[in-house]
Image (cartoon, rainbow, N blue to C red):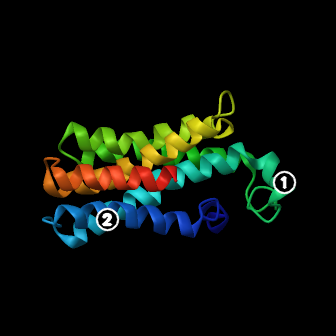
Amino acid sequence: MLLGLLRLYRLDAFLIFLLVYLLGVVAAGGMLSPLREFLVALLVSGVSFNFVYSFNSWADADIDAINKPHRPIPSGVVSRPQALAYSLFLLGASLAYPFILFGSSTQILLCLWIPVAGVLYSNPVYPLKKKRLLALLTIAVTVVAVASLGYISNAGVPDTRFYLLALVLFVVCIA
């Protein structure tokens, strides 16, 4: 069952957000320990974005049953209640570890944006993913937030490189 739960998340998304965080670290000059930053990148991608994708899989189970019957919930590898329980566990971890790991409120808020964006994007009441412009803006802001988290974790104070990185990432996401 654990492998099924892990399959709710996609490997390509895991790697993308791991690299986006590390892009911010590299753009800042990487002043902190590379091992520490890699571990933070693993937490951001492996816990926070795992929540986003697992919650989305739970919310999209009916749609996936038609379009992607091989996914874990429609194929019966994971039940919807199991997926929701797993997502809620990841949500709790996503809301807790920023307070343990980061010292500044900016870092904490950037990290907390990820699960908030996931809930906004996939919630069954008013999902932003069904509103094209809002979905695009949510994704773009989230990508910029993750790179900014990596940058601020290493440089502390935003400078010209930071604003250039944020602008370029935002434009690339919008394009």
Indicate the amino acid at tag 1.
Ala
Q: Residue at x 38, y 59 (%)?
A: 43
Label placed on residue 85: none
- Left or right side of 71 for 16: left
- Closest to the observer: 45 or 67? 67
Label 2: element kind: helix
Indicate the amino acid at tag 2.
Leu
Tell me where residue 40 sits by quadrant: bottom left
Mark 2 crowd level (few <14, some 14–19, many ≥20, 10 Å Cα) = some
Residue ID for mark 1: 65
In this view, the residue farthest toward the right is 66
Tell me where residue 119 sits by quadrant: top right
- Counting from the top left corner in percent of width and height, residue 81 is at 71, 45
- Counting from the top left corner in percent of width and height, residue 172 is at 45, 56
Q: Earlier in the sequence, mark 1 or mark 2?
A: 2
Q: Residue at x 83, y 61 (%)?
A: 69
Identify whether 131 is placed above or below 158.
Answer: above
Label placed on residue 23: 2
- Left or right side of 43 for 72: right
Identify whether 75 is placed above or below 57.
Answer: below
- Left or right side of 63 for 33: left
Identify whether 11 is placed above or below 81.
Answer: below
- Closest to the observer: 109 or 36? 109
Nearer the observer, disc 1 or disc 2? 2
